[in-house]
Amino acid sequence: VNFNGTGTVAIRDSEGVSSITDGGTGDYYANFAVAMANTNYAASSNVEPSVSNGGSDTYLSSLATASCRLNHFEVGTRRDSNTCNVIVMGGQS
């Protein structure tokens, strides 16, 4: 899924992600159209930083069969991003 993580969160394009839930600044849930078979799937993320002079840290957590959570920080502070990407690979139920 590729989505806008600023303002009104919106999916730009997706394969298998039905919606994005905005959990607050720098906190998003990618909700799957079809549940994964288990929580042992592979997931990766990429976020375009909004601060050019500091470190950026993005990670996925809370891998559930129906969703995964993306967390994004810049210079130690949660931040929204204009461009967020999540890739998930694994068996579906």
Image (cartoon, rainbow, N blue to C red):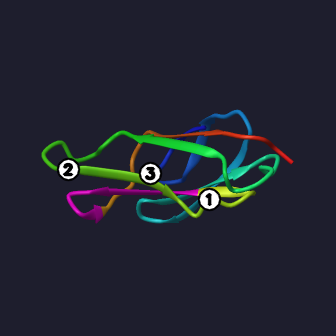
Secondary structure mostly taken by the magenta-highlighted segment of the chain: strand
User: Which circle marks residue 55 in the picture?
Assistant: 2
Q: Name the residue under label 3.
A: 6
Compared across the picture, whether 34 is left or right of 48 comes to right
**Residue interval drawn in magenta:** 69-77
Q: Which amino acid does label 1 sit on?
A: Leu
Q: What residue sits 41% from the left and 64% below the top?
A: 25
Q: Which of marks 2 and 3 is nearer the N terminus?
A: 3
Q: Does the segment drawn in magenta span residue 38?
A: no
Sort mark 2 into few (<14), some (14-19) or many (20+) by Cα contacts within 10 Å: few
Residue 89 vertical position relative to residue 77 in the rendered view, above or below: above
Foreground disc of the pair 2, 3: 2
User: How many labels sit on residues?
Assistant: 3
Based on the displayed image, in which of its 4 quarters is residue 13 positioned? top right
Sort mark 3 into few (<14), some (14-19) or many (20+) by Cα contacts within 10 Å: some
Compared across the picture, whether 25 is left or right of 33 comes to left
Helix, strand or loop under label 3 = loop
Q: Mark 1 points at which residue?
A: 63
Q: What residue type is labelled 2?
A: Gly
Where residue 29 sits in the image (x, y, percent)? 59, 58
Q: What residue sits 69% from the left and 53% below the top?
A: 31
Q: Do the residues labelled 1 and 2 touch (CB within 8 Å)?
A: no
Q: Which of marks 1 and 3 is nearer the N terminus?
A: 3
Compared across the picture, whether 51 is left or right of 47 comes to left
Q: Distance between the residues labelled 1 and 3?
A: 23 Å
Q: What residue sits 32% from the left and 58% below the top?
A: 73
Residue 64 vertical position relative to residue 47 in the rendered view, above or below: below
